[in-house]
Amino acid sequence: MAARVSRRAALAAVLALGAGAAAAQGLATYPVVIKNGRIDPARLEVPAGVKIKLTIRNEGPGPSEFENLDLRVEKVLGPGANSFVVIHPLRPGSYHFIDEFHLDQPGMTIVAK
């Protein structure tokens, strides 16, 4: 009986992960490029109340850390690395992101409208 419950739990977990991945694929996706600490685009308008996906590419020669502490978004990328973050639905307003390894650069602002 315990083995049957474990198999069901495992199957449920696999299906949940697959559903999450499928949902992430259907999200509005916005590309972000970081190079030498500069984040492009510097300003990005997105719809408020909608979950979004940012694809992030580090084109610089060193590491970068794409971050917004208020939203609990943090992604470290090595040189030439690609990754993504999914951001929960945002309330209308502005959200500032930085490359923590390059605090001398202006960062990026997401404006949810």
Image (cartoon, rainbow, N blue to C red):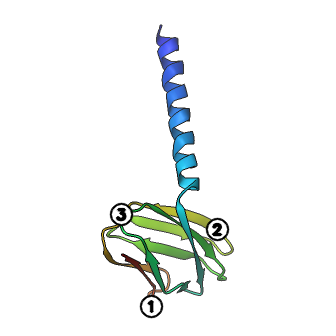
Q: Nearer the viewer, residue 62 or 33?
A: 33
Query: Which x, y percent locates residue 35?
Result: 61, 85
Q: Secondary structure at mark 2?
A: strand
- Point out the tag, 2 or 3, that comes first from the N-terminus: 3
> Is residue 99 at least partly visible in the picture?
no
113 displayed left or right of 30: left
Query: Which x, y percent locates residue 67?
Result: 44, 73
Quadrant holding the C terminus: bottom left
Q: CA distance from mark 1 to mark 2?
A: 21 Å
Q: CA distance from mark 2 to mark 3?
A: 26 Å
Residue in the picture at 51% in, 46% down: 20
Residue in the picture at 53% in, 49% down: 23
Of labels 2 and 3, the one closer to you: 3
Q: Residues within 10 Å of mark 3 (few under 14, many from 20)?
A: few
Q: Which residue is mark 1?
A: 106
Q: Amino acid at mark 3?
A: Gly
Q: Amino acid at mark 1?
A: Pro
Query: Which x, y percent locates residue 12?
Result: 50, 29
Residue in the picture at 66% in, 80% down: 59
Which of the numbered marks, if any, corresponds to residue 82?
Answer: 2
Query: Mark 2–mark 3 contact, CB under 8 Å?
Result: no
Q: Residues within 10 Å of mark 1 (few under 14, many from 20)?
A: some
> Is residue 32 at least partly visible in the picture?
yes
Of labels 3 and 1, the one closer to you: 3
Q: Which residue is mark 3?
A: 49
Q: Nearer the viewer, residue 33 or 113?
A: 113
Q: Amino acid at mark 2?
A: Asn
Q: CA distance from mark 3 to mark 1?
A: 26 Å
